[in-house]
Image (cartoon, rainbow, N blue to C red):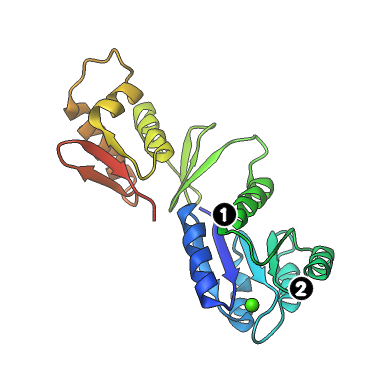
Amino acid sequence: MFRVFLVEDEVNLSNILVSYLEKEGWEVRSFNDGQSALRAIHEHPHLWILDIMLPDIDGYQLLRSIKEASPDVPVIFISARDADLDRIIGLEMGSDDYLAKPFLPRELVIRAHRLLERVYRPKSGSSLISLHPYVLDEDRRMVLKGRDEIELTSKEFDLLLYFARNRGQALSREQIINHVWGGDYVGSDRSVDDLVRRLRKKMPDLRIETIYGFGYRMTVK
Ligand code: CA
C-alpha cells in the first residue's frame, strides 16, 4: 500500500488529483500549504507530489527539507511558473520528475506509477498489487499486511488474484469457478461461497461485496 502526499494549494485541483490517485489504490493525503506538509515529513510517505507555488513557503524549500529527512523518497514537482527554469532547478535539487501545469491528471498518475515502480519494485522483479491495507505479491504468491504475511491456500490466493485483477467488476459464480477451478470442474456455487467466506475471514479488510443471485465484486477504497 503506497502512501502519497500531495501538496497543492488550489483546492479544486487538489481534490481532482486526490481522487485520481486514490483510484490507484493508494493512500493519499493532501496538504494545502507548505507548513502543514513540513510537519508531516517525518511520516515518510512513499511519494511526494509538490506544487512549487504555495501560499506560505515555496516548494523548493519544502523539497530541500524533504530530501534532508528522507533522501531516497521520490518527489514529483508540479509548477505553473517559468516551466523550464523550475524543471532545471527542481531536478538539480533532487526532484525525480517534473510536470508543467496544466497537465492531465492521468499524466500525473502515470508518472507516479513509474516512480513508485522504479523506487520500490523488489529486485526479484515481483509484481505487487495494492489492496489496501494488503499488498499482494503476484510472483511470489504472497500476501502481506504491513510486515505480516497472511497465509492463504492456493485456491484462496487464486481467487484473491482474480478479484484483484478485476477490481470493480461484478464476477459471477460461474466465472469464478471457471477461473479458479478450471472449466472442467463440476462444482457447486457453494464451493465459491465457501472460498469467499474463508478469504473474508483471513482478510477482513478486503472489500468484497455480495451480489445476490449473481456473485461477487471487489471494490477499492
Ligand atoms: Ca499553487
The residue shown at (32%, 49%) is 207
Quadrant the C terminus occupies: bottom left
The number of numbered discs placed on residues in the rendered structure image is 2
Q: Position of residue 136 (x, y in %)?
A: 47, 41
Residue 212 appears in which quarter of the rendering?
top left
| Foreground tag (2 vs 1) | 1
The residue shown at (15%, 37%) is 213
Q: Is residue 153 above or below residue 91?
A: above
Q: Is label 1's Cβ within 8 Å of ligand 1?
A: no
- Where's ligand 1: which quadrant? bottom right
User: N-terminal of the two: label 2 or label 1?
Assistant: 2
Q: Is residue 136 above or below residue 184?
A: below
Disc 2 secondary structure class: helix
Horizontal relation, residue 113 to residue 156: left or right: right
Question: Which residue was labeled with disc 2?
Answer: 64
Label 2 CA crowd tier, 10 Å (few <14, some 14–19, many 20+): some
Disc 1 secondary structure class: helix
Q: Which mark is residue 210?
A: none
**Dot 2 amino acid type:** Arg
The residue closer to the viewer here, 165 or 105, is 105
Q: Is residue 164 above or below residue 88?
A: above
Q: In the image as oriented, which residue stretches furthest toward the top?
A: 184
**Dot 1 amino acid type:** Arg
Q: Position of residue 214 (x, y in %)?
A: 19, 36
The residue shown at (35%, 27%) is 155
The residue closer to the viewer here, 78 or 143, is 78
Question: Which residue was labeled with disc 1?
Answer: 106
Label 1 CA crowd tier, 10 Å (few <14, some 14–19, many 20+): few
